[in-house]
Structure formats: structure tokens, C-alpha cells
Image: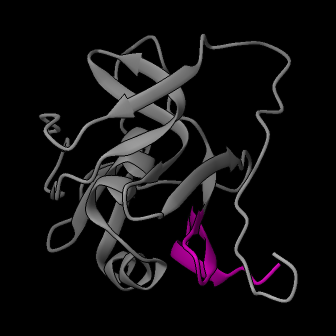
Amino acid sequence: VDGEDNMFFGRNLDWSFSYGEKVLYTPKDYNYQPVFNGEDRNHAVLGIGIVVDDTPLYFDCANDAGLAVAGLNFPGYAEYASDSVNLTVNVAAYEFPLWVARNFTSVDDVAEALKNVTIVAKPINDQYPVAMLHWIIADATRSIVVEYTASGMHVYDDDI
């Protein structure tokens, strides 16, 4: 709207092939069991992705609080932990968008939580290798980029 500060969130799936992606909806009462020790605070999630082994794998999504997440290719740079790390919240790379959208209502809350998160290179099954991604996360007030590399977790403000 003219004269107002607004946050717009968008991206494109810039692949030359399809994974069979479609609109997915994960209701609040979905029985989500994080692979490691992450929580599930039951936010409803809507986005684009695929379902593998009864698990929604979101390419991008938003929750009922207006928090949005999108994964983008980051090959050659992304490097996740090879196994879970004690005393941190461990999240499998494939479940990261779902984990963020199910558990948080603001970018501020996500950024604070990520100070103690390990992203683990665990595939959902043998058919799907671990995707090398980084993520944008946004709400109505701010946006961040999340990258996990050989040197660990990095969170950058994204004011573009």
C-alpha cells in the first residue's frame, strides 16, 4: 500500500524439472515428530512441497502467524553437521522449514533460537539425498538469511 512499510515475501522454483511439488497444508493437529530433539508447537503451515514417508517437505511455506520460510540452493557452500551435537537443538536439514514454521511466530524468535541449533545432514530416506540449501525467513517486520557451513550457523539480516 502506498506510503506504508510492507514486507513482501516471494521466490521462484527455478528448476528445469519437477519433484511433483504441490500445495501442502499441515494443520495444527498434525502429529509432527521431529527427527532429533526439536519441539513442535503446532502452528498450521501452508506452502509448496512434496510428501515423503508421510512427512511434508516444504520448499517454501508460511504459518498461521505470518512467518514465512523458503529454501534456496546453496551447493558448494552448505555443509551441515554429520551427526547430532549434544546440548544443542538438532534439526535434520530436510525438516528445517517445517520445524521453523511449526515452532515460531517471529523472525526475532527464530534468530534467538538458532543460536543453539545444529542442522544435521540426515536424509529422509535413501531416495532423497540431503539438499544443500540456505533459507530466507521473514515476518511482517524483518527478514533473515540462514546458512549452515563448515564454520557452523550463520544468520544475516536481509533488508532488501
Decide if residue 10 is on the left or right side of residue 101.
Answer: right
Residue 116 location, quadrant: bottom left
Residue 123 seen in render: no
User: Is 46 rendered above or below residue 39?
Assistant: above
Q: Residue visible at 86% across and 18% down?
A: 16
Residue pictured at 37% horizontal, 59% vertical: 100
Q: Main secondary structure of the magenta part?
A: strand
> Residue 41: x percent and y percent?
16, 59
* Residue at 64% over, 82% down: 156
Left or right: residue 115 versus residue 77 is: left
Q: Position of residue 44 (x, y in %)?
A: 30, 47
Relative to residue 68, is residue 56 drawn left or right? left
Residue sitting nearer the eye, 147 or 99: 99
Q: Is residue 43 magenta?
A: no
Camera-side residue of 25 and 52: 25
For the point 78% across and 13% down, which residue is it?
Answer: 17
In which quadrant is the C terminus drawn? bottom right
Q: Quadrant of residue 142?
A: bottom right
Compared with 96, 110 (above or below) is below
The spot of residue 147 in percent (x, y) is 59, 65
Residues drawn in magenta: 137-160
Q: Quadrant of the N terminus?
A: bottom right
| Position of residue 76 in the picture relative to residue 67 (left or right) | right
